Amino acid sequence: MYNSSSDRIVSALRERIAAASAGAQLPSTRQLVAEFEASPVTVQKALRTLIGQGVIESRPGVGTFVRAIRTARPNDYGWQTAALGSPQHRIPDSSSALRTTPNDVIALHSGYPDKELLPERLVRAAFTRAARSEAVVSRPPTAGLPELQSWFASELGTITPAGVTSPVASDVVVLPGSQSGLSTLFRTLVGAGRPLLIESPSYWGAMLAAAQVGVQLIPIPSGPRGPNPDDLDRAFAQTGARAFYAQPNFTNPTGGQWSAELGDTVLGIVREHGAFLIEDDWAHDFGITANSVPLAAREDSGHVVYLRSLTKSVSPSVRVAGLVARGPARDRILADTGAQAMYVSAALQAVALDVVTQPAWHTHLRSVRQQLKSRRDMLVTALREYAPSTHLEAVPHGGLNLWLRLPDETNLHQLTRDCEAQGVIIAAGDDWFPAEPAGRYLRLNYSGPNPGAFANAGRIIGEALDAQQPSQRPVVNQPTASAPS
Amino acid sequence: MYNSSSDRIVSALRERIAAASAGAQLPSTRQLVAEFEASPVTVQKALRTLIGQGVIESRPGVGTFVRAIRTARPNDYGWQTAALGSPQHRIPDSSSALRTTPNDVIALHSGYPDKELLPERLVRAAFTRAARSEAVVSRPPTAGLPELQSWFASELGTITPAGVTSPVASDVVVLPGSQSGLSTLFRTLVGAGRPLLIESPSYWGAMLAAAQVGVQLIPIPSGPRGPNPDDLDRAFAQTGARAFYAQPNFTNPTGGQWSAELGDTVLGIVREHGAFLIEDDWAHDFGITANSVPLAAREDSGHVVYLRSLTKSVSPSVRVAGLVARGPARDRILADTGAQAMYVSAALQAVALDVVTQPAWHTHLRSVRQQLKSRRDMLVTALREYAPSTHLEAVPHGGLNLWLRLPDETNLHQLTRDCEAQGVIIAAGDDWFPAEPAGRYLRLNYSGPNPGAFANAGRIIGEALDAQQPSQRPVVNQPTASAPS
C-alpha cells in the first residue's frame, strides 16, 4: 500500500507538471508503464494520488490533463446533482414565520414571543447560577436530568383526575426542543410512507417534520372548536392510520380549544382504533381566558404521547422540551432520540429547571396572561375597526395568534407585499394547510414587539385589503372617452 | 357536533354506571336507541364519550361494559405492539461507552474526557458572560451564529494550501452536536436502504445514526494506517455507493492517522466515483505527537463534507458542532437540520465561540496535549508490563483511545465482568464493528478520571486475561482418580 515505486512516479510527474501549462495532456498509462518500468497498478495509483492532490484531472475516455489552478475559480458542483439524486422526501422551505426582520417594522408573522414576554431576569439569573454548577461541565442521562423529568411529570400529575394513574418521571424524555420531538415521534410512531392524521390547518413545523420523515399527511378539517369526530373516525378506518397529531389547546394557527366532551370523544376514537394521539401542548403557558387542559392528564393506557416545549415560554435560547409517553412506545422514542442527539445539554436543562421552579415563575406567567390579553384585544379591536371585510371566527382563549379569514377574492401575495411596503410583516395562512388552503387566511401573531403599533398595523392591513376591491377604489383621474383636444 | 341529546344520554348513563358494579353489561345500542328515543349515531357518540372518559369499555362483538377503576392498576400497553409494528429500522442499544459509573471505579470505557481535561474555567466564565448577553434571550439563524460559522471556516482556512479555495462562513452549518450531524448527513447524502461505505472498525455513534436512518453499511477493513485504497475503490464500484464515512485523523477506535499520500489517494477515488467523503474530525483538538490535518482543507470541489464537534474538547454541556459542506449538498443538509431542530441555542453557540476565541484556549490545548501524552504512556506501559498477551498494533499519535488486540480465545464477556468486579470498567471492542468483529479487542480510553490508577488497571486486565488461560492456571485440589476411602 505504501509503494515507494508509486511515490517515485508521483514526484517525477509533479516536477514535470510544474513546468507544464494548464491543460497539457499527460502520456497514456501504457507509455508511463514503459517509461517508469512499473506495473499498470502502480502507475494508476500514482495518477490517482495526483488527482487527489488536485494537480491533474482525468477525463474518462480522453486522457489525463494538467489541472488549471486558480485560487478564486468558481467551483463546479454539478457532479453533486448525480450523487445526491432526487431527495427521498422533499422538505419545504422554512415558513415565513421564521423570518428575522429589522426592528423598525411591525412584525405579526413570527412564531416567537417578544423579549418583553420572556422571564428575562429569571433566565439570566439561572444562567449565572448554572455557570457555577456542575451542569456546565457534565453529561446528563439520555432521557434527561431526573429532576427535570420529575417536573414535567408532576405538571401533568397535578391535573390528573382521580382514577387515572399519573405519569412518573421515567415516562418523560427531555428533548432539545419540540421540533426534534416531532421528528422523533413521526419516525417512531408512524414511519416513512405511512399515514398520519393531522388537523387542517395545523402547525407548519409539524408539517416540516412530517416532510423530513416522509410520512403521508391525511388532513382532518378543523377549526376553533376542533375537528369533527366523525371525520376523524372515518379517516382512521379508511387509511389504517395509527396516529393523530393535534393541538387540543390553543391550536396553532386557529387558537381553538377543544371542549372536554370533544376531548373524551377523540380519546374514545383513538382507543377504538388502537392508535396514538400525539398531543402538542405548545401553548401550555399561554392561557389567557382559559387554561390548557392536556388530554394526556386524563389517559393512562399509553394512547396519548404528549409534547410540551419550554422554548417559547422560557427563552428561545433554552431549547428544552419534555415528551411524555408510556409503554413500549416510550422505549422506541428514547432509542431514536439517543441515536439522534445522544442527550440534551445539562446546562440548558439546569437553566430550564431553575426558571420553572422559582416562585417568580408563576408571577411571571400571570403577568404574561395579562399582557397577552391586552395585546390580543388591541389587535382584535384594530381589525374590527379598520378591516371590516375580514372575519375572525373566534377570539382565542389562549395562544399567540389570531386566525383571520379574508375575502375569497384576496390576492394574498399582493397583500403581504403591500403590507410589507408599509412596514407590517404578515404571514399568509397557506403555510398552515397540509393540502390546498380551505380559504384565504392570515395568521397574525400578537406576541411580537411593539404592541403599541397594533392599531396602526390593523389600519394598514385594512387599507391594503380595500385597495384590492375595485368597487371601493376611489375613482381618480378617470380618462374621458373623447379624444384629447 | 355539540349534540345536547348525546349529552343527555351521557349524563343519564353516568348516573346508572356509578351505581353499577364493575364489569356489568350495558344495554345494546338498539335498546338505548329505543330507551332514549335518539338516533343510533347519537347513542354511538354518547358511548364513545363514555369510553373516552374511561368509565366503560367496548369488547367488539360482545358488548359494552362498566370499566373497573383502580388507581394503581398495572397498565396494559399490549395494544401498542400492534400500533407500533416492527420498527422500520432497528436501533441497537446505546454502547457501553455511554454508561455512567460511580466515582470509585477506574473507568476506561467512556468516550468522554474527564473534567480535568476540560477548559473548565473558560467554560464557566463564558457562561457567566453569556448570562449578561443577548444570546440567552434571542434566536439565531438556522445555519448558526455568523461569528461561529466564520470561526469554523477559518480553522480550516488556516491550513488550506495555496491553490485550493478556503471554505467561507456560509459553507458552515452549526449543529447541536456531531451526532445529529451524522444523522443529517446519512439522511441527506445517502438515504434509507442505500449503501454507505464505512471503515471497520469505526465509531459506534456513526453506526447508531446509520441504524436510525436505515442506511446499509458496507464495511471497509481499516486499521492504524487507514483503509486499503483498492478495497475502497472496489466497494464503490460494486455497491454504487455515493458516500464514505471515515475519520482520517486519530480514528475512533484504532487511533490511526492516514498518511498524506493515502489521503490524496482516497480523495482521488472519491472524486473518480463522484462520491462524498464524510470526514469526521472528532479529535481535532486531541493531537498528541501529531496534529490533525483534515482532508477538507485540501479539497474545494464539494466532495468532502466535514464534521467537527466541540462537545469533547470544550464541554459535554456545550453541544455544538460545525459542519462544512459546499454546493447543493450544503443546501440539502441545511434544510434537514432546519426541519430537525430549527436552530441551535444561541447561548450555547455564544459560549462555544467565547471559549475557542480566548487566548487561554491555545494554552489549554497545549496542556491537554501534555496530559494526554502522559496518560497514554502510563496506560501503554502498564499494559506492556502486566498484560503481555495483548497486542497494541500502534501507539496513537492523537485521540483518546488505545485499541488493544486480545488473544483470539478470550471470552470478552467474562473479561469485562471480571474486570468490573475488580473496579475496572472496560469496553469490549465488538461495538465498534459494523459487522462481525475481526478479532477480540478492547477500546481503552485514557482520558477518563484517575490516571494515577492506570497501572493498577493494567494489572487487573492482565490478571483477568491470565485467569482465562487454562495452561497458566495453578492446579489446585485436583481430585484423585480413585474413589474416596
Image (spheres, coloured by chain):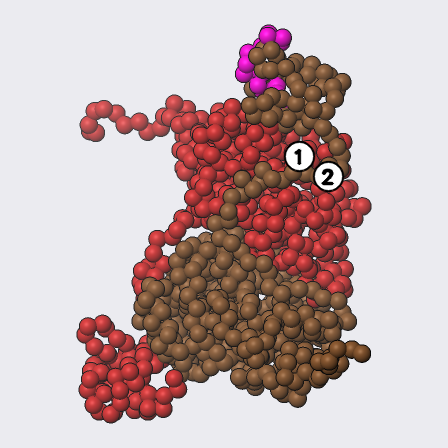
Chain colours: A brown, B red
Query: Quarter of the image containing the N terminus of chain A?
Result: top right
In the displayed structure, B430 sits above or below B181; it is above
The residue wearing badge 1 is: B299
Residue A177 occupies quadrant? bottom right
Residue B166's label in the rendered image is 2
Is A92 on the left or on the right of B165, as rendered? left
Which residue appears at 42% of the width and 71% of the height?
Answer: A220
Residue B239 occupies quadrant? top left
Q: Residues within 10 Å of mark 2 (few under 14, many from 20)?
A: many
Residues under labels 2 and 1: Cα distance? 9 Å
Q: Residues within 10 Å of mark 1 (few under 14, many from 20)?
A: many
Name the amino acid, label 2: Ser
Q: Secondary structure at mark 2?
A: loop
Residue B149: image location, x then y, percent: 71, 49
Q: Main secondary structure of the magenta part?
A: helix
Residue A30's label in the rendered image is none
In the displayed structure, A271 sits above or below B382; it is below
Same chain shared by disc 2 and disc 1: yes
Cβ atoms under marks 2 and 1 closer than 8 Å: no
